[in-house]
Image: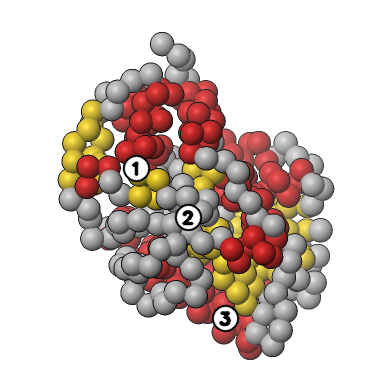
Amino acid sequence: MTILVTGVAGFIGHHVARALLARGDRVVGVDNLNAYYDVRLKQGRLAILREASGFVFHALDISDREAMQDLATRNPDISGVVHLAAQAGVRHSLVDPYAYVQANVMGHLVVQEMARRLGRLRHLVYASSSSVYGANQSLPFSETDRVDTPISLYAATKRADELMSYAYAHLFQLPQTGLRFFTVYGPWGRPDMAYYAFARAIMAGEPITLFEDGALRRDFTYVDDIVAGVIGCLDRPPEGDAPARVLNIGNHRSERVSTLIGLLEQELGRKAVIRTAPRPLVDVEETFASVDAIAALTGYDPKTPLAVGIPRFVAWFREWHGIGRS
């Protein structure tokens, strides 16, 4: 099969593409390599993918209508799309809101328009986010919960994507699955994510800001578990008059941020310098995924606890940054 992966130089996109290539699929990768974080990390991910003969890369922006349509015209054999390209980062949406609407809303629309014209397409899987649950207080978060109280623009754009996808599934019978990711971590991760930023600060002896004394809780999900779920969903397109669904994809385990800090200290061999602050308005107190629906569909069974995943991340972190053990 030929699978289009958008955001292929990103954290999750890189890992998904590697898994697809490993099972023999041809991967057409798209990324605009923007400078939201260090482009060298994106280039490092791409270098690994380029070692596979079945990988083709196109440097382009998903919101560029002509470029995306030309890509589809030149690759009529695309049978699946894993759409992961987006402007990431909840807090950065307070700084540059226009980038979020351009990438996450317009970009998603362009991908929809391109996908509905692919004659062999079986399924489009796209990245939503646990952020859509917003101010929801019911735990664990379930796909049947209301999601009409976003507390960040990022969350609002991801909910908009879900609504657009339902409309396109209804109008054009375009099979789609939106995956609500919960705090994904692991090797080749994003430097703006807390676990990565904490690791860098600990090694540099710089202070870490913990909100609510580290009492906030997150459903930390190791990237290998995420990849298994993404591909399991890709292989099982929805059916019906409006073939659209949204699914949680998390670890079904909520842990304190202070636990994460303790594991990083243990693996890095250094104590964190900690300062505390109130929780920002864009941050929720806790995330916790119900994964019953995706488990019933695909057999999804996340097996990697934080105590296993963080040492794997730190091993990669040391290698990438050239940090030996003291």
Is there a contact, CB below 8 Å, between mark 2 and mark 1?
no
Local SS, label 2: loop
Judge whether residue 69 can be spotted in this image. no
Q: Name the quadrant of the C terminus.
A: top left
Instruction: Please name the amino acid that badge 3 sits on.
Output: Tyr
* Residue 44 visible in the current orientation: yes
**Residue 182 disc label:** 2
Q: Residue 311's x, y, as percent?
A: 50, 29
Label 2 to label 1, Cα distance in Å? 14 Å
Three-letter amino acid code of the residue under disc 1: Val
Q: Residues within 10 Å of mark 2 (few under 14, many from 20)?
A: many
Query: Could you say where residue 51 lies in the image, as x and y percent from the top left?
Result: 72, 36
Q: Residue drawn 75% across and 62% down?
A: 235
Q: Is residue 158 left or right of residue 198?
A: right
Residue sitting nearer the eye, 150 or 292: 292
Whether residue 25 sits left or right of residue 219 in the image: it is right
Mark 3: give few (<14), some (14-19) or many (20+) Cα within 10 Å: many
Residue drawn at x 57%, y 84% is 167
**Separation of residues labelled 3 and 2 (CA atoms):** 21 Å
As drawn, the label of residue 257 is 1
**Mark 3: which secondary structure?**
helix
User: Can you tell which of label 3 and label 2 is closer to the viewer?
Assistant: 2
Q: Is residue 192 above or below residue 149?
A: above
Query: Residue shown at 71%/84% (left/top)?
Result: 240
For the residue marked with disc 2, what is the amino acid? Phe
List x then y, in percent, for residue 103: 46, 64
Instruction: Check the image and name the residue furthest to the top.
Output: 326
Q: Toward which corner of the image does residue 147 lie, by quadrant? A: bottom left
Colour approach in the figure: secondary structure
* Residue identified by numbered label 3: 166
Tell whether label 2 touches label 3 (CB within 8 Å). no
Report, in whole angstroms, how far the alpha carbon at label 3 lies from the one at label 1.
35 Å
